[in-house]
């Protein structure tokens, strides 16, 4: 067979696959879309903990820092990420919505890192009466209400698996921006709140060995009918030794320019302060290039906040969440340490830093749009 014939045959097979996919989705696609295309000002909890059936995209995720002893008394330390993305990719919410799970473990004792982003489910949106949420994708599950959350699941090879973990706090959730609504750069506006000082308990099965762990974590929930388009960001969750926490969000447009900066300080008494944009900045102090994707990430940085400067340093440089099957949306999400000064006082702490170098933000029904493009209709 000639080389020129192979691409034509591949295109024909791909078009046939697209036709089959279109046929299997048609009955779902006729259901229609959700409600209005905006993020309403004034987040109200626990109601807004639930899935927003009118949102094109939404996520709940927990990142954190754990330590504990195994049955032989050996101490282990970990960073972790567990995430559920909700995407109305079929324009069929709330009847059939795509849920995608990401899971990652940084084993700081072994100096190794493992991740997956290829866990999918299609299911109805579950909006519990009275608020709260309960979402799953494959083996990954997260639920919560009124500052008490649970999560479970892990890798299919059973290398790292959470039993039912509990993550809770007593201080109020932090509503970012204008009562929980932020400007989201090229993507419009977004609902956004965080639980920034969660205490975690439970069991992590490390290659089959139970490790009873405790630690601290951070939950983010963000949603909206975002404008489809391209951009990226750097994001930080900082938990400091002076009992304050910082959320910092540096959002880029398609050209890589910063177009939106958001910062929130959670004070020691649990109140929140919106930080002046003019007093927020970041600078890269170290990079890492992935051998898997070739992407160079800014993994170490300094951030300037009102009253001080903080250095954010990764505990491992290789903390890329990637998939060869899903090349769009590869990103770096890393457990890190923090050190610096605030108002003349030395502080230390722990952090997670997220680098999204590029995202092509999907809208309602992006699967339908992709299929139509493949078919040329």
Image (cartoon, rainbow, N blue to C red):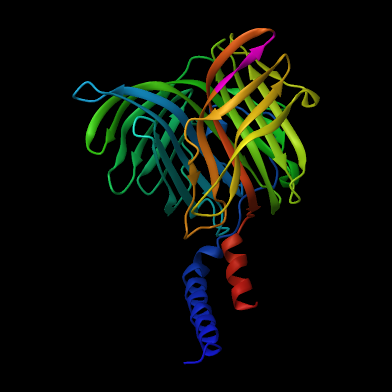
**Majority secondary structure in the magenta region:** strand
Q: Where is residue 261 in the image (x, y as percent from the top left)?
A: 73, 33
Residue 340 within the segment the image draws in magenta: yes
Q: Where is residue 60 in the image (x, y as percent from the top left)?
A: 51, 37
- Identify the residue shown where x is 64% and y is 21%: 310
Q: Residue 377: which quarter of the image?
A: bottom right
Image: 24 above or below 109: below
Image: 10 above or below 326: below
Q: Residue 214: which quarter of the image?
A: top left
**Which residue range is magenta in the image?**
338-343
Image: 359 above or below 308: below
332 with respect to 257 (left or right): left
- Identify the residue shown where x is 60% and y is 22%: 174
Image: 322 above or below 21: above
Q: Position of residue 197 (x, y in %)?
A: 51, 19
Q: Nearer the viewer, residue 221 or 297?
A: 297
Q: Which of 244 and 362 is in front in this view?
A: 244
16 with respect to 34 (left or right): left
Number of marks in picture: 0
Give the farthest residue toward the left.
Answer: 72
Q: Where is residue 131 in the image (x, y as percent from the top left)?
A: 50, 31
Give the farthest residue toward the bottom.
Answer: 1
């Amino acid at each position: 067979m000639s080389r020129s014939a192979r691409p034509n045959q591949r295109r024909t097979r791909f078009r046939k696959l697209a036709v089959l996919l279109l046929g299997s989705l048609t009955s779902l696609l006729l259901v229609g879309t959700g409600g209005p295309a905006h993020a309403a000002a004034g987040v109200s909890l626990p109601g807004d903990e639930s899935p927003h059936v009118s949102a094109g995209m939404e996520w709940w995720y927990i990142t954190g820092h754990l330590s504990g002893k195994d049955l032989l008394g050996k101490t282990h330390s970990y960073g972790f990420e567990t995430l559920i993305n909700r995407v109305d990719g079929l324009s069929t919410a709330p009847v059939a919505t795509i849920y995608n799970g990401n899971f990652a473990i940084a084993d700081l004792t072994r100096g190794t890192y493992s991740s997956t982003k290829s866990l999918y489910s299609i299911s109805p949106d579950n909006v519990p009466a009275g608020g709260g949420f309960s979402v799953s994708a494959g083996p990954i599950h997260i639920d919560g209400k009124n500052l008490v959350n649970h999560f479970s699941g892990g890798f299919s090879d059973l290398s790292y698996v959470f039993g039912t973990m509990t993550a809770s706090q007593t201080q109020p959730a932090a509503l970012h921006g204008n009562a929980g609504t932020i400007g989201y750069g090229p993507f419009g506006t977004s609902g956004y709140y965080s639980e920034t000082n969660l205490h975690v308990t439970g069991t992590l099965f490390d290659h089959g060995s139970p490790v009873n762990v405790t630690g601290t974590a951070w939950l983010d929930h963000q949603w909206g009918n975002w404008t489809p388009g391209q951009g990226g960001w750097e994001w930080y969750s900082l938990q400091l030794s002076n009992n304050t926490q910082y959320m910092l969000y540096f959002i880029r447009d398609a050209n890589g320019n910063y177009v939106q900066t958001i910062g929130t300080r959670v004070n020691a008494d649990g109140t929140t302060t919106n930080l002046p944009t003019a007093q927020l900045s970041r600078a890269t102090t170290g990079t890492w290039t992935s051998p898997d994707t070739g992407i160079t990430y800014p993994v170490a940085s300094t951030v300037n906040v009102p009253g001080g400067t903080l250095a954010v340093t990764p505990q491992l440089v290789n903390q890329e969440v990637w998939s060869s099957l899903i090349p769009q949306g590869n990103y770096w999400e890393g457990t890190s340490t923090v050190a610096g000064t605030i108002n003349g006082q030395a502080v230390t702490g722990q952090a997670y830093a997220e680098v999204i170098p590029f995202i092509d933000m999907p809208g309602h029904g992006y699967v339908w749009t992709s299929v139509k493009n493949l078919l040329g209709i």
